[in-house]
Amino acid sequence: MASRNGVAQHIGREATIEGVCGRAWKLPRLTRGITVKFEEWAGAQLANPIKAAREEVEALAVRAVEIKRDKSLDDETRAELLAANLRQREQITEAAIERSQVPMSARANALLNTQAGATHMLYLLLKVHQPDVTEEQAFDVLMEIGLDAVQEKIDTAAGVAPPKNAPAPAPS
């Protein structure tokens, strides 16, 4: 995992968030260790696509048995319902297989675009220079400066270059 925008183009650098929640907050350059910790956290947040699909498919299989046993259905309706049930199980299975082939790092990166993911990454970064920081404090920082500003700081730490048409960043 490099950043919310993909692969880093440069070596990351330290950044500072000034005057937020009554203090200055120093962020280190993003390291492999921080990345691994974030991916471990993300793994706990993200459902296993195969396991989730298995539960859905099992519920649909139970429904198929109920359809077969339903004496109030005529043969044509029963056949249509069973065919639809089977199609739905196949679609769920195919979608789960596709999702499971997306590397964990890409799935974890997607979390950086969420409040929870950005808060946790900010927490991991802040913890390097402020070891007593809590995730609640990281959330307070995010709420004060906003998700976009936190993501910009994460990008700086990760070494992601700003878009070519973006103004030059202020010194951190």
Image (spheres, rainbow, N blue to C red):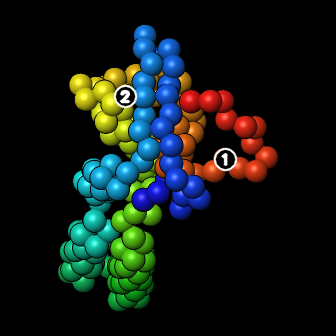
Q: Depth check: 94 or 57 in front?
A: 94
Q: Amino acid at mark 1?
A: Pro
Q: CB atoms at circles 2 and 1 under 8 Å apart?
A: no
Whether residue 81 is visible here, answered yes or no, is no
Q: Residue tagged by mark 1?
A: 162
Relative image position of residue 15 (x, y in whole percent): 50, 34
Left or right of 44 on screen, residue 101: right
Q: Residues within 10 Å of mark 2 (few under 14, many from 20)?
A: many
Q: Residues within 10 Å of mark 1 (few under 14, many from 20)?
A: some
Quadrant of the frame with the C terminus: top right
Relative image position of residue 76 (x, y in whole percent): 41, 88
Q: Residue at x 62, y 30 (%)?
A: 171
Marking on residue 138: 2
Quadrant of the frame with the N terminus: bottom left
In the picture as drawn, the residue positioned furthest to the right comes out as 165
Q: Is residue 96 above or below residue 48?
A: below
Alpha carbons under labels 2 and 1: distance apart? 23 Å
Relative image position of residue 6 (x, y in whole percent): 54, 60
Compare marks 2 and 1 and give the one earlier in the sequence. 2
Q: Depth check: 7 or 138 in front?
A: 7
Choose top left, top right, bottom left or bottom right for residue 152: top right
Q: Residue at x 30, y 33 (%)?
A: 127
Choose top left, top right, bottom left or bottom right for residue 50: bottom left
Q: Amino acid at mark 2?
A: Ala
2 vs 1, front mark: 1
Q: Depth check: 138 or 12 in front?
A: 12
